[in-house]
């Protein structure tokens, strides 16, 4: 019923959905300098990789919840409520993905 209300505006719903939080899978990693992990031992990088992976899993779950909340909010209220309330953690997901990539690349280069 609420969806029909928005469909009469033609493109309004897709435009509002574009304002929703991104899915964690669609977030690109942010740049992290490879020099940040130069000089780290393999064991230190393995430990950091575990910490980053755990933090990324938590942030990705939060981002998925924000996306779901935004979609529901747009359909029911016409507003991306999660993004408006600060639940969107896309920058954190991007930052963690960037660290994960650099750690994995550095570990491969050092044959860890």
Image: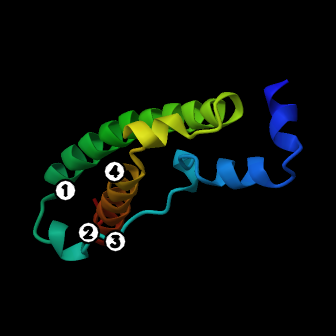
Q: Percent position (x, y) of residue 80?
A: 56, 40
C-alpha span from label 1 to label 4:
25 Å
The reply to whether dot 3 and dot 2 touch (C-beta < 8 Å) is no
Distance from disc 3 to disc 4, alpha carbons, whole Å, reads 12 Å
User: Label 1: which residue?
Assistant: 42
For marks 2 and 4, the one nearer the N-term is 4
Marks 2/1 in contact by CB < 8 Å: the verdict is: yes
Tell us which disc is closer to us: 1 or 3: 3
In this orientation, which residue lies closer to the viewer: 54 or 49?
54
**Is residue 60 among what the camera can see?**
no
Q: Which residue is mark 3?
A: 31
Q: Residue at x 58, y 39 (%)?
A: 79
Is there a contact, CB below 8 Å, between mark 3 and mark 4?
no
At horizontal 76% and vertical 47% (from top left) the residue drawn is: 13
Q: Few, some or many C-alpha atoms within 10 Å of disc 2 (few <14, some 14-19, many ≥20)?
A: few
Point out the tag, 3 or 4, that comes first from the N-terminus: 3
Mark 4 — residue? 92
Dot 2 lies on which element?
A: loop
Specify which label sits upstream in the sequence, 1 or 4.
1
Q: Quadrant of the N terminus?
A: top right
Secondary structure found at label 1: helix
Q: Position of residue 109 (x, y in %)?
A: 31, 72
Decide if residue 78 is on the left or right side of residue 101: right
Question: Residue 110 got which mark?
Answer: 2
Q: Would you say 101 lies left or right of 10 here?
A: left
Separation of marks 2 and 4 at Cα, in angstroms: 27 Å
* Residue at (35, 60) in percent of width and height: 104
Which tag is nearer the camera, tag 3 or tag 4?
A: 4
Query: Along the line of sight, which residue is nearer the eye, 50 or 86?
Result: 86
CA gap, disc 1 and disc 3: 22 Å
* Numbered disc 3: secondary structure: loop
From mark 3 to mark 2, how far is it between C-alphas? 20 Å
């Amino acid at each position: 019923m609420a969806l029909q209300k928005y469909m009469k505006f033609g493109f309004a719903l897709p435009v509002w959905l574009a304002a929703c939080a991104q899915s964690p899978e669609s977030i690109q990693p942010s740049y992290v300098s490879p020099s940040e992990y130069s000089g780290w031992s393999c064991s230190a990088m393995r430990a950091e990789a575990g910490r980053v992976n755990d933090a990324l899993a938590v942030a990705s779950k939060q981002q998925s919840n924000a996306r779901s909340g935004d979609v529901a909010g747009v359909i029911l209220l016409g507003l991306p409520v999660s993004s408006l309330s600060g639940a969107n953690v896309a920058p954190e997901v991007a930052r963690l993905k960037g660290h994960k990539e650099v750690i994995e690349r550095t570990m491969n280069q050092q044959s860890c």
